[in-house]
Image (tube, grey):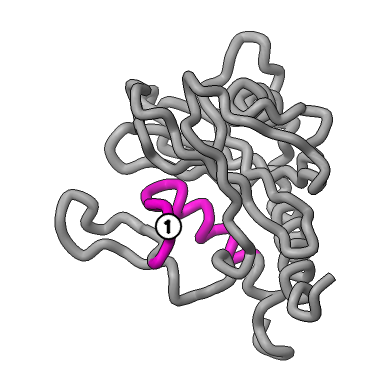
Amino acid sequence: MRPDAGPRQAALETIVRGVEGLRIPASLDWAAARRYLADNDGQWKFSAVLVAIVARDEPTILLTKRSWNLSEYSSHVSFPGGRPADCDDDVGATALREAFEEIRLEPGAVRLVGCLPIHKTRKRHHAIFPVIGIVPATAGWEAAPAEVEEIFELPFATLLDPTLPRQYLDGERAGSWYWADQRYDIWGVTAVILKSLAALASAAASPPGQG
């Protein structure tokens, strides 16, 4: 382990404790999950995504660039995920199934920790459960070409830099969050989910007495 990797490992442990403290289990069945949305008026489209944290010495987060020919969010950076299927018993099952379909990540390789609260999209009425899972560095994944163009890993050093999450001030994306100075265009709900993770990790990154 590199000398500067310690704080990143501490951040990972803090995220896990923070997610567990939210008490939104990945085993939440979809009927109960829908009740987590207080303003559910029947217009919301529910889904789950897998936020896979790779437990390297320097932890990373798996992200995908969606295929250009998809009907929604084509070429966007996102987490693997999608709508629940009839075969899915719970929110975690949806996230794991979609991750296997999109990036061939074996469900048995993922230790599910729990969920973040629902994240909503502004324009398309998507209500998304981010399911947090820990993946060993020895796990394998590959892009399913019909859905995913590329898979990449976001280092925790990026996640923990408070200067990087910013909001667009004008244009079509005005008000949306994005991560600045990145090779990939990380914005919208993906950026907000990452920002939520960063908030959970901030205690580990803060000086003593300021966490």
**Quadrant location of residue 85?**
top right
Q: Is residue 191 magenta?
A: yes
User: Does any portion of residue 30 appear in the rendered image?
Assistant: no
Q: Nearer the viewer, residue 56 or 121?
A: 56
Q: Quadrant of the C terminus?
A: bottom right
Q: Which percent across, then down, holds residue 193?
A: 51, 51
Q: Position of residue 116 (x, y in %)?
A: 61, 48
Q: Residue at the left extreme?
A: 171
Q: Is residue 125 above or below residue 130?
A: above
- Say which residue label 1 marks: 183
Q: Does residue 156 sit above or below 115 in this rendering?
A: below
Residue at figure coordinates x 40%, y 33% from the top left? 126
Q: Left or right of 171: which side holds 85?
A: right
> Between residues 176 and 35, which one lies in front from this camera angle?
176
163 left or right, relative to 13: left
From the viewer's perspective, tell me whether residue 103 is left or right of residue 78: right
- Tell me the quarter of the picture where residue 18 sits: bottom right
The secondary structure that dominates the magenta segment is: helix
Kindly identify the amino acid type of the residue bearing the numbered disc 1: Arg
Between residue 47 and residue 29, name the one nearer to us. 47
**Which residues lie in the magenta part?**
181-200
